[in-house]
Amino acid sequence: MRFAVATYGTEGDTRPLAALCIALRAAGHETHLLADANTLGSARDAGIPVTPLSGDIRRALAPGQALATAVDRKGGFGQTARALADIANANVMNWMQEIRDVAADGDALILSGLAAFAGLSVAEALDIPVVGTGLIPITPTQAFASPFLSPNVVPRPLHRFSHHAVNGLLWRAFRATTNLARESVLSLPPRKRLWTGHPMLYGVSPTLLPRPRDWPDNAQMCGQWELPAPAWTPPPALEAFLAAGEPPVYIGFGSMAGFDRARLAQAMIAAAAGRRVLFHPGWSGVDADMLPDNFFIVGDTPHHWLFPRTAMAVHHGGSGTSHSASRAGVPSVVVPFAGDQPFWADRLHRLGTADKPVNGRRLDVCTLGRAIAFADRADTRARATELGQRMAAEDGAGNAVAAIEQLLSI
């Protein structure tokens, strides 16, 4: 089959979809990935046909922009949802055109992220099957509350309702502009209700988050969608640093930006207390000149190679990094900023591989130091090792391909 695959978000949103495209291609299918231009490198390197979607997610995360402000202020669901809706609403007209142009030659659509509503409309107009995917479990359940809400705040009897409420609020934030684009681009009537009933496949480990028993049959936890291990050779300087002493602490916050860079640097330096540190600046904008000699600056490096060589991973709690650290068998120190990050921070804490999350807005040196000390404990390391061994047996992308083929009766 020929699949058009569309998502919109940061690297953490696009890379798993690139991994799924690669797995589908290995199974004999054709794939074409549409995503933000800044995030298509891994798919392009793998030879997957790509089309950039309109917009600039990196610019949206720059200081002063709405999404960056939500991150910096640890924005709640409402502020973050409005910032995300602003991005989608500004681009949905173009997204529908761009997705339609690719999907018109395809047999089915696979959708994720902010581009989902545009893609669902295109599938409706072309009358082709659609499979929803995601890294955040949004299918309503009684097992846990919506991942977009603060953990442990929603009473258990309201867990399922919280999913419906959050999903409905998101749709209302997108609805007006989506309906204008439906009429203008696709000649479709306005849609009043949120799409339901289509399959949902999650690149989420059932070891990290067991599949809820009350989910419908077409909602599945497949396991993490990882890119195939590349033929990657580390730079000599990185190899030399790793060989020069004990396993270092990894610190990296991925695509997060917009926070107080000076305060972040000061907190990292103080909490590290002279320990060897691998720091990945990502999109943070932290100036390497601010950091002491015990910090080694590392560029984009495959997590599957790097994390097993570290003592722990200090990160923002994104789904992808939380999975990669867990799969590598290393403890985490989670500094969530916004969105679903507190949800994954809570999951790792419940599993005993991370201390309580560190407030990303008010980064406190003592709290960060205590979380590092927790990750250093022998019992924490043992739990992380055991969790990693169980996750290593999962074939997330393979499970997703099998599910897609079954759902579409290929």
Image (cartoon, grey):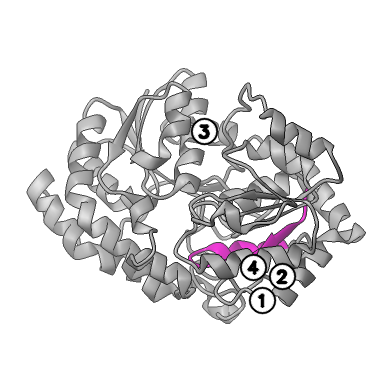
Q: Which residue is mark 4?
A: 266
Residue in the picture at 64% in, 53% down: 322
Q: Where 232 falls versus 384 (above or below)?
A: above
> Distance of mark 3 from mark 1, alpha carbons?
36 Å
Residue in the picture at 27% in, 69% down: 172
Task: Give the amino acid type for the residue marked by disc 1 in the picture.
Answer: Asp
Q: Which residue is mark 3?
A: 19
Mark earlier in primary sequence (3, 2): 3
Q: Which residue is mark 1?
A: 364
Mark earlier in primary sequence (1, 4): 4
Question: Does 38 sit left or right of 324 as displayed?
Answer: left
Q: Position of residue 245 (x, y in %)?
A: 86, 43
Residue in the picture at 62% in, 73% down: 363
Quadrant of the snapshot with the C terminus: top left
Mark earlier in primary sequence (3, 4): 3
Q: Position of residue 107 (x, y in %)?
A: 30, 28
In this picture, which residue range is highlighted in magenta?
A: 330-348
For the residue pair 309 and 242, the one nearer the viewer reads as 242
Q: Position of residue 78 (x, y in %)?
A: 38, 75
> Distance of mark 1 from mark 4, alpha carbons?
10 Å
Q: Position of residue 27 (x, y in %)?
A: 51, 20
Q: Where 154 falls versus 180 (above or below)?
A: below
Question: Does 395 sit left or right of 185 as displayed?
Answer: right
* Tag 3–tag 2 contact (CB < 8 Å): no
Mark 3 crowdedness (10 Å alpha carbons): few <14, some 14-19, many ≥20: many
* Tag 1–tag 2 contact (CB < 8 Å): yes
> Distance of mark 3 from mark 2, alpha carbons?
33 Å
Q: Which residue is mark 2?
A: 368
Task: Give the amino acid type for the residue marked by disc 3 in the picture.
Answer: Ala
> Distance of mark 4 from mark 2, alpha carbons?
12 Å
Task: Give the amino acid type for the residue marked by disc 4 in the picture.
Answer: Gln
